[in-house]
């Protein structure tokens, strides 16, 4: 039986649900796959062979599957770094096709995968099923145990793939949440204006930038943060977009704009007021955020979206303390808020 995107998932779930002894050699696993396994599998044995090494598998999903072993006897999970197959086999049927359990092996998840056309074959011939089972046994014998070290390495590879994936939109405000996650974007929230001494030091940095050999420094529109050291708990990231926004005394957000650090221009000075050493973190204006436009109008709209989250961050906290958090934290907070709202109905 030929499978398409219309019936692939249904038949795959049916294979898992109907088999007592199920074997899955599926290279790449993404968000939601663990829930599919948890809800669909009721048999005696389920062996999962994945590929953790190439960055196409979300390690959180594999952690969840491994944790599921504590309550689901008969579940085993191994990794094989040269696996690229997408095969499921049980006693009376098998599926050989194109679909991973992240829909593809490029680090995409959820709505990022909408529109991908999958194809496969549902196999019912006993001879072919036996051959597929023998093929799986040979791979399973080569599979490796998944350790905490392997999961940590997989996290690095996964995030590297996620940050390099194509965008789902050209405008930042139109991008689905799934497309914004895992790109290293941060939100920097500040309130206190810079001192006059910091402004003078920033002027020196601007003069230095004009003589730089690097055009991205020489031609950059510059700004800065005063006294935001790299040693602090919420340091400003190097090499990733920073959405800077001012949270004023009246709890109003203003001036949201995208920046990136220019550490070659960073400097320190001794404060005339305190006698302490103060750092000046230099930033260059970005034209694009992870390849997407963010116009002033769109920035204002996105700031309104951020406002409830920022208000909650500063509830009971010193509003003069700057915060720098991953945009992923905001997206998770917003998703949790929506989930609670749905559950209340």
Image: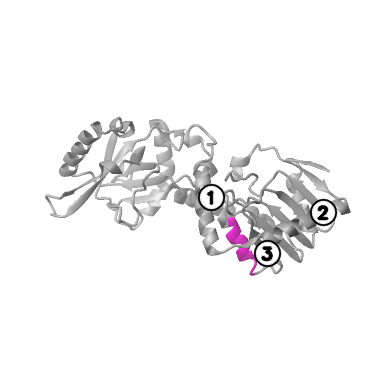
Disc 2 to disc 3, C-alpha distance: 21 Å
Identify the residue at image location x=86%, y=50%: 124
Viewer-nearest residue: 337 or 230: 230
Question: Where residue 331 is drawn, which disc sits there?
Answer: none
Secondary element at image label 2: helix
| Residue to which mark 1 is pinned | 158
Local packing at callout 3 (Cα closer than 10 Å; few below 14, some 14-19, many 20+) is some
Determine the image quadrant of residue 104: top right
Q: Main secondary structure of the magenta part?
A: helix
Count of numbered marks: 3
| Residue to which mark 2 is pinned | 131
Determine the image quadrant of residue 67: bottom right
Q: Which portion, as a residue range, is magenta?
A: 61-70
Expressed as whole percent of the image width and height from the top left, the position of residue 274 reads 14, 54
Q: Nearer the viewer, mark 1 or mark 2?
A: 2
Judge from the rendering whether residue 189 lies leftward or rightward of residue 151; answer left or right: left
Question: Where residue 76 is drawn, which disc sits there?
Answer: 3
Viewer-nearest residue: 122 or 156: 156
Identify the residue at image location x=20%, y=51%: 278
Local packing at callout 2 (Cα closer than 10 Å; few below 14, some 14-19, many 20+) is few
* Badge 2 or badge 3: first in the primary sequence: 3
């Amino acid at each position: 039986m030929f499978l398409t995107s219309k019936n692939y998932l249904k038949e795959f779930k049916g294979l898992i649900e109907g088999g007592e002894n199920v074997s899955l050699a599926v290279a790449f696993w993404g968000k939601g796959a663990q829930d599919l396994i948890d809800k669909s599998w009721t048999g005696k044995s389920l062996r999962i062979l994945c590929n953790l090494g190439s960055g196409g598998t979300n390690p959180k999903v594999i952690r969840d599957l491994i944790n599921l072993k504590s309550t689901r006897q008969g579940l085993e999970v191994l990794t094989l770094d040269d696996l690229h197959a997408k095969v499921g086999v049980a006693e009376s049927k098998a599926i050989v096709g194109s679909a991973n359990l992240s829909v593809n092996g490029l680090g995409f998840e959820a709505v990022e995968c909408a529109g991908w056309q999958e194809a496969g074959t549902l196999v019912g011939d006993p001879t072919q099923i036996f051959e597929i089972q023998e093929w799986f046994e040979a791979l399973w014998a080569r599979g490796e145990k998944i350790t905490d070290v392997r999961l940590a390495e997989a996290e690095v590879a996964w995030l590297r793939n996620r940050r390099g994936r194509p965008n789902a939109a050209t405008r930042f405000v139109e991008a689905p949440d799934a497309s914004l996650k895992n790109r290293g974007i941060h939100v920097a929230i500040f309130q206190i204006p810079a001192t006059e001494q910091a402004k003078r030091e920033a002027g020196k940095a601007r003069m230095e930038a004009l003589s730089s050999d690097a055009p991205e420094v020489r031609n950059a529109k510059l700004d800065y943060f005063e006294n935001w050291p790299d040693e602090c708990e919420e340091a400003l990231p190097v090499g990733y977009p920073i959405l800077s926004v001012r949270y004023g005394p009246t709890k109003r957000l203003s001036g949201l704009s995208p920046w990136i650090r220019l550490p070659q221009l960073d400097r320190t000075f001794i404060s005339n007021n305190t006698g302490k050493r103060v750092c000046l973190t230099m930033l260059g204006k970005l034209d694009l955020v992870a390849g997407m436009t963010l116009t002033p109008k769109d920035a204002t709209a996105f700031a309104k979206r951020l406002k409830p989250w920022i208000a909650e961050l500063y509830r009971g906290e010193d509003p003069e303390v700057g915060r720098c958090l991953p945009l992923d934290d905001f997206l998770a907070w917003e998703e949790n808020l929506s989930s609670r709202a749905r559950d209340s109905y």
